[in-house]
Amino acid sequence: MRIAVVGAGGVGGYFGGRLAQVGHEVHFLARGEHLRAIREHGLRVDSINGDFVVSPAHATDQPAEVGPVQVVLVAVKSWQLDSAIDTIRPLVGPETAVVPLLNGVEAPGSLSAAFGPEPVLGGMCGLSVLIAGPGHIRHVAIEPFIAFGELDNRPSPRAEALRDALVEARVKARVPDDILLTMWEKFLLIATWSGLGSITRAPIGVWRSLPESRALAEQALAEIVAVAQAHGVGLTNEHAAKTLAFLDGVNPAGMASMQRDVLDGKPSELEAQNGAVVRLGQQKGVHTPVHSFIYASLLPQEREARGDRQ
């Protein structure tokens, strides 16, 4: 397959690297020192599932040089999506599938607004990965998984072909019966974990064990379930209970990636996580007091991190 990876950081670098490792033509869209290192030395991936190097690697910051591809994997941070639209545009042709792997549930809508609904699939993934240095990806935890599918859940040869390519690359990949529900299941987890971790400034073992902050987490889960149901997504209280049980099993020192960005004073995914719960709730008249409090409390720092002090 001919594949482009927009956002060749940890997530894009890992999945794109695995696909390139088994012979697919993967083009990495990158910038700066990361791009230079990939061009000169290839893409190095250190992984708990085995290290490898993609060399030579196709890497560029000029998407027009690549042209239309079969699949675009969009792996930028959620707050970078709007600026990535222009990068994606030259990669999209009549047969292209655009697969967002961002946190949150709003990316398919943004991509459909830019390119029309036909190219866009729903998608999500999970793994713990970071950029160790220019041209160097380190996968440190979690068995990588990825799910995607047509937004109307119809059977799709293009989704099945991508799934088969990823399975060939030893990635746990699936096309679920309901991709939007699958995306919301992850959203339920990350928005709650990110929000509680960021507002308490504490690792998960602290806030889940204190009755007061645990109660906030339980309410935060319930709010997301209510918002999902108002939007016609089949999230239930059982999903919330399973998510809370999962959070109880996480390493006590664990922190969500958004929380780490907040603690470091960096731009974060606040808008795509807790902010999205608030916005999507307002659209359907669903009150979200916990997420509204989290969002409002973190917003001043978020604007400071983005250089917007008004």
Image: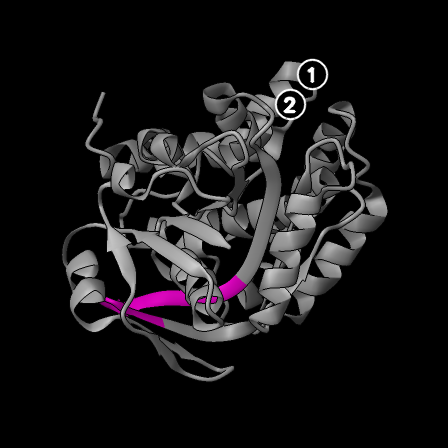
Identified at 45% across, 51% down, the residue is: 3
Residue 284 is labelled as: 1
| In magenta segment, residue 301 | no
Quadrant in the picture for the C terminus: top left
Q: Is residue 293 visible?
A: no
State the residue at coordinates (33%, 54%).
28
Give the number of marks.
2
Q: Residues within 10 Å of mark 2 (few under 14, many from 20)?
A: many
Circles 2 and 1 in contact, beta carbons < 8 Å: yes
Query: What's the amino acid at mark 2?
Result: Gly
Q: Which mark is residue 240?
A: none
* Element carrying mark 2: helix
Find the magenta span and give its range: 127-137
Percent coordinates x, y for residue 70 in the rendering: 50, 44
Q: Pinpoint residue 202: horizontal percent, then vertical percent.
A: 46, 60
Tell me if residue 41 comes above or below residue 213 in the rendering.
below
Residue 14 visible in the picture: yes
Rendered location of residue 66, percent (x, y): 31, 44
Circle 1 SS class: helix
Quadrant for residue 201, please give it. bottom left
278 sits left or right of 27 in the view: right
Taking the image as shown, residue 259 lies to the left or right of residue 277, namely: left
